[in-house]
């Protein structure tokens, strides 16, 4: 497996002036998932990211041991940053995730779709394709998210190196309100299913998505370690808080059960429209952001 220490975003290292809460340390150098050094949790970057993501809080995080099923939730609010730093510092051997979208007040469990009250970001999660060179795949993904964007897709607000693949977020100028109903949820998810399709991305369009927290460590399980993966720091490689979008900047995938036109299909991918409903697909989110 080739090292990817030299891969770079075309705009990596851009100035972050104007970012909410004066986040000035979020754009970092790449961390290699095959490097020799054991990474250290960057608690300051993690807190700064959460402050930008949701300045008013709260921040609902979940923790997963790499060798065990199930999640342990933890809720923090503004004013508890010192407690958050101390908590994160003790989790360097585990996997920490954040809820991307707003959840019900006081919720202290991993959210279900019905617990999400608003979609504030559209997102995509892209991992290296199985059987391909990992270094080349990671560079391909980064290119896709920067200067080789699919037609009609605007530049992301932020790009995150998850320690395996890459994730991108598009901040919405106005959130999509949700009432917990399946109808509203499915309608909102048509935007992320469209992004998923045009990028050929992982199945990750759900509104209750948890994503790896920047500044935390991607700790692979035994199966992945046997394939050469080691712990890697999740970092932000691009951050443009001024990029706010209206929904008119995006398209929607067809309603579930409808035939998908070629425009929402990834190149060279043969896709079949399957209605999965509100099904929990995998036991481990590690399989979603490898």
Image (cartoon, helix red, strand yellow):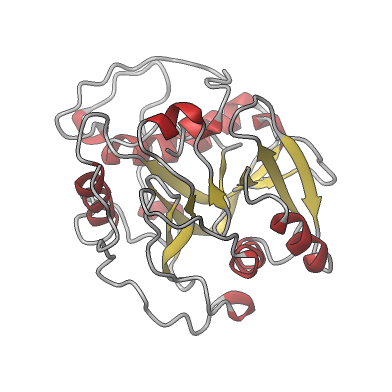
- Image quadrant in which the C terminus is located: top left
Q: Tell me which residue sits at (45%, 58%) in the image.
A: 37
In screen coordinates, is 264 left or right of 176?
A: left
Q: Which percent across, then down, holds residue 113?
A: 64, 31
Q: Tell me which residue sits at (45%, 39%) in the image.
A: 289
Q: Nearer the viewer, residue 179 or 139?
A: 139
Q: Which percent across, then down, holds residue 155?
A: 33, 61
Q: Which percent across, then down, holds residue 285?
A: 54, 32
Q: Tell me which residue sits at (38%, 33%) in the image.
A: 202
Q: Nearer the viewer, residue 115 or 247?
A: 115
When asked about the image quadrant of residue 165, the answer is: top left
When asked about the image quadrant of residue 64, the answer is: top right
The residue lying furthest to the left in this view is 268
- Compared with 243, 203 (above or below) is above
- Image quadrant in which the N terminus is located: top left
In screen coordinates, is 163 left or right of 84?
A: left
């Amino acid at each position: 497996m080739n090292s990817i220490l030299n891969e770079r975003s075309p705009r990596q290292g851009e100035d972050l002036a104007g970012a909410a809460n004066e986040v000035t340390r979020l754009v970092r150098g790449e961390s290699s998932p095959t490097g020799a050094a054991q990474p250290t949790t960057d608690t300051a970057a993690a807190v700064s990211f959460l402050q930008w993501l949701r300045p008013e809080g709260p921040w609902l995080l979940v923790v997963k041991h790499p060798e065990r099923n199930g999640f342990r939730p933890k809720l923090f609010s503004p004013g508890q940053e010192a407690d958050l730093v101390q908590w994160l510092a003790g989790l360097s051997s585990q996997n920490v995730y954040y809820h991307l979208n707003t959840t019900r007040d006081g919720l202290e469990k991993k959210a279900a779709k019905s617990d999400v009250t608003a979609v504030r970001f559209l997102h995509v999660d892209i991992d290296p394709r199985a059987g391909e060179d990992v270094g080349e795949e990671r560079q391909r993904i980064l290119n896709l998210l920067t200067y080789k964007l699919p037609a009609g897709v605007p530049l992301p607000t932020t790009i995150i190196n998850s320690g395996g693949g890459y994730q991108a977020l598009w901040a919405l100028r106005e959130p999509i309100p949700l009432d917990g109903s399946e109808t509203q949820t499915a309608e909102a998810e048509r935007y992320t299913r469209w992004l998923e399709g045009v990028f050929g991305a992982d199945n990750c369009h759900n509104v209750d998505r948890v994503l790896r927290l920047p500044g935390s460590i991607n700790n692979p399980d035994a199966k992945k370690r046997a394939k050469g993966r080691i712990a890697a720091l999740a970092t932000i490689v691009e951050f443009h808080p001024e990029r706010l979008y209206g929904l008119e900047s995006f398209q929607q995938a067809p309603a579930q059960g409808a035939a998908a036109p070629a425009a929402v299909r990834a190149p060279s991918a043969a896709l079949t429209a399957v209605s999965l409903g509100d099904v929990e697909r995998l036991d481990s989110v590690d399989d979603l952001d490898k």
